[in-house]
Image (spheres, grey):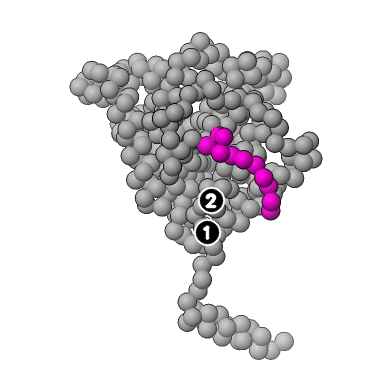
Amino acid sequence: MNIKLDIEPFRVPDGSPFKIAKAKTKVKDVYDDDKHYDSLIREYQEEIDELQQQMYAQDRHGLLLVFQAMDAAGKDSTIKHVMSGINPQGVEVHSFKRPSEEELDHDYLWRTTKKLPPRGHIGIFNRSYYEEVLVCKVHPEIVTKYQRLPESATTNIKKLFERRLEDIRNFESYCDCNGIHILKFFLNVSKEEQKDRFIARIDTPAKNWKFNEGDVKERAFWDDYMAAYEDAIKATATEECPWYVVPADDKKNMRLIVSAAILAELKKLKLAWPELPADQKATLADCRKQLLNEAK
């Protein structure tokens, strides 16, 4: 496989210089036409699948892919197209919506921590613990009224979110040290493109079910969300657990960039099929001999 796709412009391993206003929502196509796109996405799927199988056999590493975005950016379709060729035995997808009563009785990381992928697996979070510093930051009343925190924790709401970002950074570092590597994707759709996709959902009966009146109301907080995303990326982007800020106005471009990023990060793990010790190789040789000597 020899796909040349430069993902460095989208990789954020150090958040300090990141400015969301400078992040692109559209770039020049990385594919020539639909046929070329289909060929590229299949190649990515095949190589990611082989590396995932090696990771499963090796049983030393796990990979968590976190997808965050504004509504209609294409999280669901990206997960579907990028991972559709991967062995389902080694992939788990989890979507996180409004916390349940049980989840509200625990710390905010509890519901996602228990869904972390085991070694050998790829876990996918469609939204994640980052909602606690995105939606909750834009609507702090969620924290103060509904999260059942001690009054002392919510006295200084600004400090609370700063602490959460610090906790998340430390949590991700802890996971990485234990072999669970985390890649985070912000699918960066423009406000104009989001509007067009919302209208398409309204105008297309087969897509009506995707539309929620609340999605339009949240557009009024667009600038607040962009500020929250910038703060989150700046605080939690590290070399070990980078963010990828992926232009999302063209879904095919987006899927190829995400695929290339996953493949590049998997290759860094130096995965390989396990090498059996000499005694096990001898056992295999004996078994092979027995099978060949069976009466036909």
- Mark 2 residue element: helix
For the magenta stretch, what is the residue range?
1-11
Residue at the spot of label 2: 266
- Where residue 45 appears, as percent x and y from the top left, is 65, 48
Q: Relative to residue 179, is residue 243 depicted above or below?
A: above
The alpha-carbon separation of the residues under discs 1 and 2 comes to 8 Å
Residue at the spot of label 1: 271
Observer-nearest residue: 186 or 199?
Answer: 186
Badge 2 amino acid:
Leu
Q: For the stretch drawn in magenta, what is the main secondary structure? A: loop
Rendering quarter of residue 238: top left
141 in the magenta segment: no
- Is residue 174 visible from the viewing direction of this image? yes
The reply to whether discs 1 and 2 touch (Cβ–Cβ < 8 Å) is yes
Residue at 69%, 51% (x, y): give it: 2
Query: In the picture provided, is 25 more to the left or to the right than 17?
Result: right
Q: Relative to residue 84, is residue 67 depicted above or below?
A: above
- Where residue 141 appears, as percent x and y from the top left, is 35, 15
Q: Relative to residue 267, is residue 103 depicted above or below?
A: above
**Label 2 environment density (alpha carbons within 10 Å; few <14, some 14–19, many ≥20):** many
Residue at 61%, 86% (x, y): give it: 290
Rendering quarter of residue 6: top right
